[in-house]
Image (cartoon, rainbow, N blue to C red):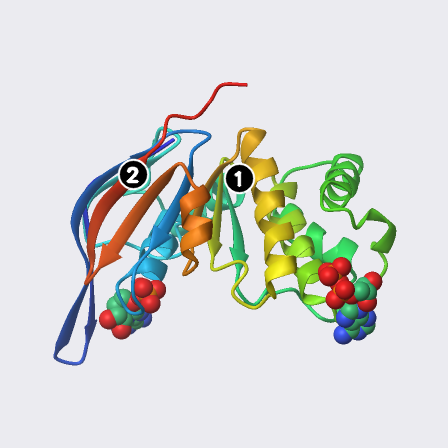
Amino acid sequence: MLSMRHLSKAYHTDTIKTQALQPFDLTIEQGEFVAIIGPSGSGKTTFLNITGLLEDFCEGSYELDGVNVEHLSDKAKSKLRNEKVGFIFQSFNLIPELTLYDNVDMPLRYRKLSSKERHERIMDALGKVGLASRRDHYPAQLSGGQQQRVAIARAIAGKPSFLLADEPTGNLDSKMAEGIMALLEDINAQGTSIVMVTHDPNQAARAQRVIEIRDGILSEGKRIEKAIA
Ligand code: ADP
Ligand code: ADP
């Protein structure tokens, strides 16, 4: 789970201060599926980047799976990020020169895993997204929907607690978008928490919780109790 208390973020450029996020409290339990909505420039990406330890916050405290991130060194933060968080982006962010297999391997290289364990995780993740047979292909040989599936494989191969997705279907047609949503719901059902920025009200409606950000102010929408299967 993650717990943020009185967290806030401001950017300072020259003499200009932009309060990207006003102080807020937020707890996300293990296994939740949270949608983040709000207009452009409202602070959604900033929120996601702070959550994923890609960016520092200014005031307040943040605990990720019981670890207070405030006083961690950059190295310790990278390690925690690598172990706990998987990222998915609108533009897939795959490395064109690497095969699907090597793309999924990228974040695992920084982990203390045996090569056997790494191989199993890569094939397992590629299998989960239905692309194991394409392991030696390159991203450009795939459709957009398939590329995003590889990005999801890369994100889940590390067995993260949290999957953070920044408009994961923003570059996809509605059919491929539906496939990606179904895949994310599947991953969530297996216990991985998902925090997803989306502009699509239908997608937001499928999350258990909707958090809206406007002018840096977080407010909570509906909250649905998850049915225990
Ligand atoms: P969203 O993802 O909702 O479009 P962002 O989190 O990207 O919003 O941006 C929130 C606010 O913070 C905007 O006013 C944006 O201009 C500002 N901002 C974001 N990143 C930076 C940065 N690196 N330096 C200065 N200002 C930034
Ligand atoms: P999806 O199943 O994700 O909807 P498409 O219907 O777009 O994929 O693609 C069907 C097939 O065509 C896939 O096997 C894919 O690998 C291939 N394909 C799609 N786009 C390209 C491309 N730009 N270059 C090479 N192959 C492609």
Q: Is residue 136 left or right of residue 16?
A: right
Residue found at x 43% / y 33%:
32
Q: Is residue 19 left or right of residue 53?
A: left
- Where is residue 112? Give x, y as percent: 64, 38
Question: 160 or 225: which is nearer to us?
Answer: 225
Question: 175 or 21: which is nearer to us?
Answer: 175
Q: Secondary structure at mark 2?
A: strand
Residue 130 in view: yes
Q: Amino acid at mark 2?
A: Lys
Furthest residue toward top: 229
Which residue, given by chain and number where applicable, does mark 2 sit on? 222
Q: Where does the C terminus fall, quadrant-wise?
A: top right
Residue 98 in view: no
Quadrant of residue 42 within the rendered picture: bottom left
Label 1 Cα neighbours within 10 Å, binned few <14 / some 14-19 / many ≥20: some
Q: Is mark 1 within 8 Å of ligand 1?
A: no
Q: CA distance from mark 1 to mark 2?
A: 30 Å
Q: Is residue 44 above or below residue 73?
A: below
Q: Secondary structure at mark 1?
A: helix
Label total for image: 2
Judged by depth in the image, the label closer to the viewer, 1 or 2, is 2
Which residue, given by chain and number where applicable, does mark 1 sit on? 83
Quadrant of residue 111 within the rendered picture: top right
Q: Is residue 169 above or below residue 112?
A: below
Q: Amino acid at mark 1?
A: Glu
Furthest residue toward bottom: 14
Q: Where does the N terminus fall, quadrant-wise?
A: top left
